């Protein structure tokens, strides 16, 4: 996951000193917030004289047309307009270069992205825009998951409340870029903050239930009535490479993954007509409780004797509540 550093979050130092620090610590992007201020392009012009890092420009305005001439004269690598103040659909000239994004605040539904399917990404504001040091609103985990499902080929950027724990969750969910300002500059050093955001998790304010794939999106089949064909179809149609076996009380009885299917086929390769349901099911999968913290989740993964690609999420009665996937961690690092 790329880190886009919000350069105006450090008001104590000159802009050149802030950016030199970010360059030295190999930050990925320079995030520039523009609240209806054409003067921000003077900073962009100045930055271009001494820094080649990609610029991630976020514009909040009800009159986007007045920015187009300056964007043509001063192209940026990432351009985002805030959706809420807009009075009509954006008509960005095709000559304006860079990847295009639409930004929304927490209460705004992802439906507003529908007219912008030619854009490259969405920027989800997880705190109040312009409020430095805000706390990440966990309802945005649902918004990220919903957007990923609906617009699978679009990237997701997140701004607001990104600390090490949130960063890990966002990477796990496949977010490609996180904007960091307050956290980045309030640590002992930018290097220390970047290490925390990209490698480690410190503290634990969120539970697994806050960001898991919910039950209604988790592939599942009946432990007592499913046939071999039913199970294979469930794994295929679920598009996760796994499906959960549950009983009538919604308790987890096991799971069937693509790996379990391969093992069953190899074991019965000479008599596939005798393949049985029980051959396909791992009856003792590693699970995690819905109330577990991110730190507990990380410990479970670290202590597992094999690579963990997904974890069934259960409650105290072993009822299935959802699933945590880890395939997106790979996507988020690209």
Image (tube, grey):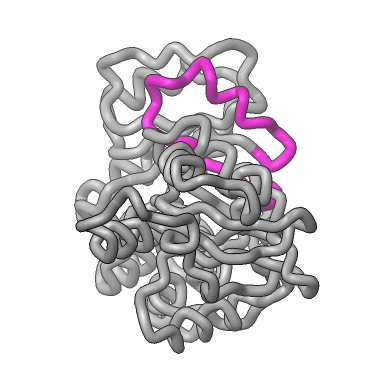
Q: Check the image and name the residue furthest to the bottom.
A: 303
* Residue 328 coordinates in the image, percent (x, y): 40, 55
* Residue 180 coordinates in the image, percent (x, y): 50, 61
Q: Is residue 244 magenta?
A: no
Residue 320 against residue 316 in the figure, above or below: above
For residue 322, side relative to residue 179 (left or right): right
Residue 301 against residue 274 in the figure, above or below: below
The stretch of residues the image draws in magenta is 105-129
Q: Is residue 182 visible?
A: no
Residue 121 against residue 279 in the figure, above or below: above
For residue 84, side relative to residue 15 (left or right): right
- Residue at the spot 29% in from the left edge and 73% down from the top edge: 25
- Residue at the spot 56% in from the left edge and 63% down from the top edge: 162
In the image, 111 versus 313, the foreground residue is 313
Q: Quadrant of the C terminus?
A: bottom left
Q: Is residue 111 magenta?
A: yes
In the image, 198 versus 88, the foreground residue is 198
Residue 280 against residue 13 in the figure, above or below: above
Q: Quadrant of the N terminus?
A: bottom left
* Residue 32 coordinates in the image, percent (x, y): 44, 47
- Residue at the spot 30% in from the left edge and 64% down from the top edge: 263
How many numbered markers are drawn? 0
Q: Is residue 159 visible?
A: yes
In the image, 227 versus 178, the foreground residue is 227
* Residue 225 coordinates in the image, percent (x, y): 63, 47
- Residue at the spot 33% in from the left edge and 72% down from the top edge: 21
Indicate the quadrant where residue 251 lies. bottom right
């Amino acid at each position: 996951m790329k880190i886009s550093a919000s350069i105006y979050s450090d008001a104590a130092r000159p802009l050149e000193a802030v950016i030199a620090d970010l360059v030295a610590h190999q930050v990925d992007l320079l995030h520039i917030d523009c609240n209806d201020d054409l003067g921000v392009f003077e900073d962009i012009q100045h930055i271009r004289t001494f820094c080649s890092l990609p610029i991630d420009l976020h514009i909040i305005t009800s009159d986007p047309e007045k920015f187009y001439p300056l964007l043509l004269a001063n192209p940026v690598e990432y351009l985002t307009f805030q959706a809420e103040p807009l009075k009509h659909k954006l008509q960005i000239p095709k000559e304006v270069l860079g990847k295009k994004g639409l930004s929304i605040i927490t209460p705004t539904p992802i439906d507003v992205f529908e007219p912008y399917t030619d854009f490259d990404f969405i920027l989800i504001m997880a705190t109040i825009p312009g409020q430095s040091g805000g706390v990440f609103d966990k309802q945005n985990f649902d918004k990220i998951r919903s957007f990923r499902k609906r617009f699978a080929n679009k990237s997701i950027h997140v701004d607001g409340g990104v600390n090490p724990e949130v960063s890990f969750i966002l990477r796990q969910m496949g977010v490609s870029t996180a904007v960091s300002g307050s956290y980045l500059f309030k640590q002992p050093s930018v290097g220390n903050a970047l290490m925390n955001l990209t490698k480690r998790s410190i503290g634990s304010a969120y539970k697994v239930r806050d960001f898991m794939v919910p039950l209604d999106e988790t592939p599942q089949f009946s432990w007592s009535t499913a046939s071999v064909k039913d199970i294979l179809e469930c794994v295929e149609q679920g598009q996760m490479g796994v499906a959960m076996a549950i009983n009538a009380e919604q308790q987890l009885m096991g799971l069937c993954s693509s790996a379990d299917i391969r093992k069953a086929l190899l074991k019965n390769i000479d008599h596939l007509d005798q393949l049985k349901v029980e051959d396909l099911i791992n009856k003792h999968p590693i699970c995690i409780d819905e109330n577990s913290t991110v730190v507990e989740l990380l410990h479970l993964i670290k202590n597992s004797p094999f690579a963990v690609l997904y974890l069934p999420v259960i409650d105290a009665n072993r009822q299935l509540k959802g699933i945590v996937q880890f395939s997106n961690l790979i996507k988020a690092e690209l």
